Amino acid sequence: MDVTWWKSSYSVANSACVEVAVADGGASVLMRDSKNPSAAVLTYSRESWGLFIDDIRTGRLRRP
């Protein structure tokens, strides 16, 4: 699958971040570890990814 990966502009120099890509004509969002791009890729439906982002934006998901 040929997709374009990107990571947040908030990523730090130590590369401790994830990369995301859109696949299947926008139906899926892929996520991988930027330090190990050949490892496993997680796949989320567009709907579940949207709910995840909404939870982050509203503060329902916070680091302890």
Image (cartoon, rainbow, N blue to C red):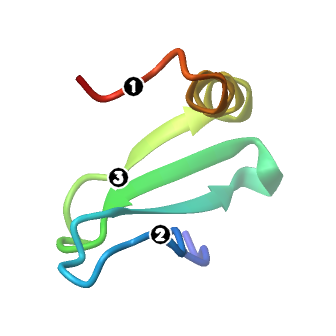
Q: Residue furthest top?
A: 60
Q: CA distance from mark 2 to mark 3?
A: 21 Å
Does dot 1 land on a helix, a strand or a loop? loop
The residue under label 1 is 62
Q: CA distance from mark 1 to mark 3?
A: 23 Å
Relative image position of residue 61 (x, y in whole percent): 45, 21
Q: Quadrant of residue 35?
A: bottom left
The residue under label 2 is 10
Residues packed near mark 3 inside 10 Å, few (<14), some (14 to 19) or many (20 plus)? few
The residue under label 3 is 41
Relative image position of residue 49 (x, y in whole percent): 62, 33
Q: Amino acid at mark 3?
A: Val
Does the CB distance between marks 2 and 3 fall below 8 Å? Answer: no
Q: Residue at x 44, y 53 (%)?
A: 31
Q: Quadrant of residue 62?
A: top left
Q: Residue at x 67, y 22 (%)?
A: 51
